Image (cartoon, rainbow, N blue to C red):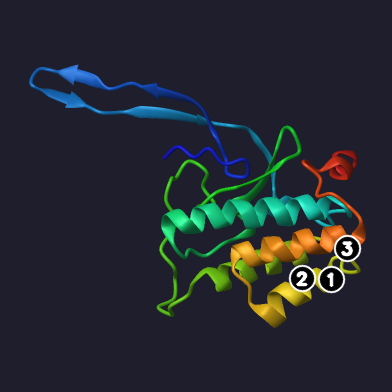
Amino acid sequence: MRLNQAYVVQAVHFRDTSVDELCSRTYSISIFLERIRLRMCDVTDVPYPDVLHLYHAALSGFGTLFRIFGYFEITERMIGINQDYKVKVWCNSNFSVARPNKPSSVLIRGEKEMVQSVLRIIDVNTDSLSKLDAFTKRTQYKSKASFKEALKHLSDYANWLGMDIPQHMERTKMII
């Protein structure tokens, strides 16, 4: 699977190592992914305004993956930070697996439940007195927003604060 999406883990090299043997062919490929330095489970208290980038990247990336795979359960091991301090997401906690795990429950879940899951995971790993409490409460509890609506809420909130959403996690660099 090749995605040209800024917030999804990218393949940096693809090598076909297939072998012809007598009357058959053994197919084998190697995919090398960009280096993910940290996972969300390794980071606590992401400082403001880096958390704006974290929300934006996670909502954008998981929104793209939702359109491809449909609903899947999200864990904090699926959110990573690469060598450029940009947040990247993947559909599986094992970045070498290109498909999500099957949901563990039989309940029918969809996009809005995935958005709530992303917000809960990020909320646990950010300052509890974050300036974004109003954003998360509005998006998570009141509107039960889709990915597109959640991104719109985030953009409106950043505009209200008079800020641009950062392109990477500048202040987190100093902590890591």
The residue depicted at 57 percent of the width and 67 percent of the height is 114
Question: Which mark, residue 133?
Answer: 1
Comparing 157 with 51, the one in front is 157
Q: Is residue 125 visible?
A: no
* Image location (x, y in percent) of residue 30: 41, 28
- With 68 as the anchor, is 165 left or right in this view? right
Whether residue 72 is situated above or below residue 164 in the rendered picture: below
Question: Which mark, residue 63?
Answer: none
The kind of residue on which mark 2 rests is Thr
Comparing 30 with 165, the one in front is 165
Q: Are marks 2 and 1 in contact (CB under 8 Å)?
A: yes
The residue identified by callout 3 is: 160
Q: Earlier in the sequence, mark 3 or mark 2?
A: 2
The kind of residue on which mark 3 rests is Trp
Q: Dot 1: within a 10 Å radius of its alpha carbon, few (fewer than 14), some, or many (20 or more) residues?
A: few
Question: Which mark, residue 136?
Answer: 2
Which SS class for mark 1?
helix
Q: Dot 3: within a 10 Å radius of its alpha carbon, few (fewer than 14), some, or many (20 or more) residues?
A: few
* Image location (x, y in percent) of residue 124: 76, 66
